[in-house]
Image (tube, rainbow, N blue to C red):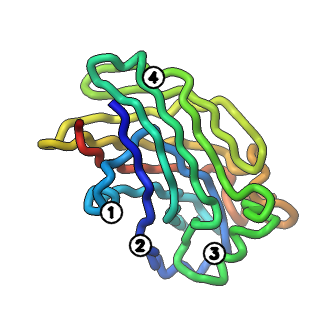
């Protein structure tokens, strides 16, 4: 089964008053074509700045998933995120995040995830191995994913920890991890119509 998503979430005002930080959100699932389903999806990044948790979200991403719970090893996924859509709640900070020191969106407008293997676990758990590319840097990652059926929908939730400096996110003074932590938690919630 193939499902496609062209997701444009509404801008979330988090009221953040801290300077910009950044991360890439990744997932392996998509939503149905219906706008109502797409609105249920979220991909967020949580990090600490000056030891205070800050959360932002990517408002624009597309995904192409072939997921069959009866044939998980044959399943696959691709995700493309517009890094300039990262929103931490204040336009001036969002602009800074897209700049050269952070995502450098003018040179690297997209971050991508391509699965290489999906393995089933117990009680609806899966592990998704793949290639994560941010700012031209590609690394191997493994994403733990929880899957469940909800009526006619499939629901996918997961968290992927990454190190922002491994992707060159935050240069110059922003390399100082006492200001913006290196650890970033990527969280996703995807609701997909089962076809």
The Cα atoms of the two marked residues, 4 and 3, are separated by 33 Å
Disc 2 is placed on an element classified as loop
Is 115 placed above or below 8 here? above
Residue beneath label 1, please? 39
Disc on the earlier residue, 1 or 2: 2
Is 66 placed above or below 158 here? above
Q: Is residue 61 left or right of residue 101?
A: left
* Residues under numbered marks 1 and 2 in contact, where contact means CB atoms less than 8 Å apart: yes
Residue beneath label 2, please? 10
Disc on the earlier residue, 4 or 1: 1
Alpha-carbon neighbours of circle 3 within 10 Å: few (<14), some, or many (≥20)?
many
x and y percentages locating residue 38 in the rendered image? 34, 58
x and y percentages locating residue 109 in the rendered image? 70, 58
Picture quadrant where residue 180 is located: bottom right
The Cα atoms of the two marked residues, 4 and 1, are separated by 26 Å
Disc on the earlier residue, 4 or 2: 2
- Count of numbered tags: 4
Alpha-carbon neighbours of circle 2 within 10 Å: few (<14), some, or many (≥20)?
few
Disc 1 is placed on an element classified as loop
Picture quadrant where residue 161 is located: top right
The Cα atoms of the two marked residues, 4 and 2, are separated by 30 Å
* Residues under numbered marks 4 and 1 in contact, where contact means CB atoms less than 8 Å apart: no
Residue beneath label 3, please? 94
Residue drawn at x 46%, y 55% is 43
Disc 3 is placed on an element classified as helix
Disc on the earlier residue, 2 or 3: 2
Q: Please identify the quadrant where the N terminus is shown.
A: top left
Dot label at residue 118: 4
* Residues under numbered marks 4 and 3 in contact, where contact means CB atoms less than 8 Å apart: no
């Amino acid at each position: 089964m193939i499902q496609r998503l062209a997701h444009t979430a509404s801008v979330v005002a988090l009221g953040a008053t801290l300077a910009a930080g950044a991360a890439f959100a990744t997932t392996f699932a998509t939503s149905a074509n219906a706008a109502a389903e797409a609105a249920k999806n979220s991909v967020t990044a949580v990090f600490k700045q000056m030891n205070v948790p800050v959360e932002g979200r990517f408002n624009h991403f597309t995904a192409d998933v072939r997921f069959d719970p009866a044939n998980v090893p044959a399943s696959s996924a691709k995700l493309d995120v517009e890094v300039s859509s990262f929103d931490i709640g204040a336009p001036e900070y969002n602009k800074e995040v897209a700049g050269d020191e952070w995502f450098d969106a003018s040179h690297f407008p997209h971050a991508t995830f391509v699965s290489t293997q999906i393995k089933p676990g117990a009680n609806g758990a899966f592990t998704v191995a793949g290639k994560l590319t941010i700012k031209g840097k590609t690394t191997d990652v493994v994403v733990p994913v929880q899957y469940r059926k909800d009526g006619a929908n499939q629901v996918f939730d997961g968290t992927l920890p990454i190190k922002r400096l491994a992707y060159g996110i935050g240069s110059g003074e922003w390399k100082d991890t006492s200001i913006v932590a290196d650890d970033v938690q990527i969280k996703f919630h995807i609701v997909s119509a089962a076809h």
